[in-house]
Every structure is written in C-alpha cells, then in structure tokens.
Amino acid sequence: MHTPLPLVMLPGMMCDHRLFTPQIEALSSERQVLVAELNGFSTMNELAHDVLENAPECFALAGLSMGGILAMEVIRQAPDRVAKLALMDTNPRAEIDEVKAARAEQLARVERGDMLGVMRDIMIPRYTHTDYPNPDIDTLCLTMAANLGEQVFINQSLALRDRPDQQQTLANVSVPTLILMGEDDQLCPLDRHETMQSLIPHATFSVVEKAGHLPTLEQPNVTTRQLANWLNS
C-alpha cells in the first residue's frame, strides 16, 4: 500500500502549530503532519539545517510568511529531499533597507520589554483582511507570541533581516508547487507572489478571497482544500 508523503509545515513569525490547526486536523488522518519550531536560531541557514535534521528523509514542505521564506532555504539546501513545495503569503526577496529600519525600531522596543506592544500595535493589525477583522485570530496571535517570548522575536527578526534573496532558488524548483495568498495580504502583496509564479511557471497559483496574511485561519476550509489538492496532485 502506498504511504502518503509526510508533510512538514513551517509557521510564520511568532506563530506555532496553532497557525495550522484546521489543516492539521483535516490532513493528519491521511498522513504524518509535522510543524517545525522556528525558535532556536537567528539565521535562515541555521533554521533550515535544524528543519532538515528533524524532518523525514523525503517530505512535502509548506510554509507561510517567515515559514515560506524558510521553506525556500530548506529546498535550496536539500532539493532532493523536498518532494512538493507550498509557499503561502511569503516573499522571495531579501529584506529592503526601509523594512530593516522599521525592524530596528521594533527590536529596540522589544529589548526594552515591549514585545507584546510591538505585536499588538504594529504586527497583528496587518494580519487579517482589512474588511473582515477577526478578533479571535488577533487574540490567538498575541497568545502565540507571548508563549514564544522575547528572545524568539529577536532571533526571528534577525533571521528575516539578514535573509538572502531566493529568486534563483525558485527558478531551480521542479517539484509540484502551490503558491497561495490571501487577497488582502498587507505584508506580502500580490507582486511578490506573481514574481514567484514567474520563477516557477508550473506552479499552481491561488488567491484566497476574504483573507489577508493568514488564510490558514481566516479561510481554513478553502486553504485546506487547496493544500489537499496540492498534496494529492
């Protein structure tokens, strides 16, 4: 009997497995679903090495936001181990100077003990669709951040700030690929995803209506269906 491919999921910044709860519940009945912890390192290189150390030998890989950025580094390091790739609400480019400057201000606040204030004031208001606010998702995101803590925020911020451009990595991707985004993603807008599609022309590109940066939670049924179709393709 054919054993379904294991799925490794990589969450966004200051998120954990709860970012993918609807997908885990729906997909784990058919296959092993693992969610990596992106907590202990401050470079994409080290984070990817850690994911690979703890992943099955061959697996499907899905990442959202920072998790998508990390997924690109994982497949760059071990293209022979990633059998399918899903990139959700993410960005293949290196961080620009304007964002680095804003990140420096955030890090300064966090180092003064105001990490939850940064999440509440700056990060979380940009997570969901502008026209479809979801206080429950806001609360969950703040809870996940509180559970992970200040040092994880610092480590992840440094990894994002210093990440490499991955456009050449994507140009070399040959495995079945899903590119998915919420229609009102304020952090990783449409042009980032169009760039990824141009680099991986065989990829399936899906825009989820009534979702922003977190379609796994905002529109879980639609997102799960898209992931299931990708896994079964």
Image (cartoon, rainbow, N blue to C red):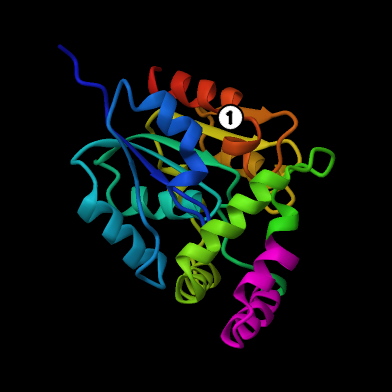
Q: Picture coordinates of residue 92 (x, y %)?
A: 55, 52
Q: Examine the rendered structure and indicate whether residue 139 appears above or below residue 150.
A: above
Quarter occupied by the C terminus: top left
User: Which residue is depicted at the point 48% across and 39% down?
Assistant: 20
Quarter occupied by the N terminus: top left
Q: Looking at the image, which is closer to me, 27 or 5?
A: 27
Q: Is residue 42 visible?
A: yes
Q: Picture coordinates of residue 73 (x, y %)?
A: 39, 55
Q: Looking at the image, which is closer to me, 28 or 107?
A: 28
Image quadrant in which you'd find residue 40: bottom left
User: Which residue is depicted at the point 48% across and 71% down?
Assistant: 149
Looking at the image, residue 110 sits to the left or right of residue 162; the answer is: right
Q: Examine the rendered structure and indicate whether residue 105 appears above or below residue 142.
A: below
What predominant SS class does the magenta segment belong to? Answer: helix
Looking at the image, residue 8 sits to the left or right of residue 97; the answer is: left
Q: Which residue is mark 1?
A: 220
- Amino acid beneath label 1: Pro
User: Which residue is depicted at the point 72% across and 73% down?
Assistant: 98
Magenta-tinted stretch: 100-123
Q: Is 146 included in the stretch rendered in magenta? A: no
Q: Is residue 164 visible?
A: no
Q: Picture coordinates of residue 205 (x, y %)?
A: 59, 29
Say few, some or many: other residues with alpha carbon within 10 Å of mark 1 (under 14 / 14 to 19 / 20 or more): some
Q: Examine the rendered structure and indicate whether residue 61 appears above or below residue 206.
A: below
Q: Looking at the image, which is closer to me, 51 or 138?
A: 138
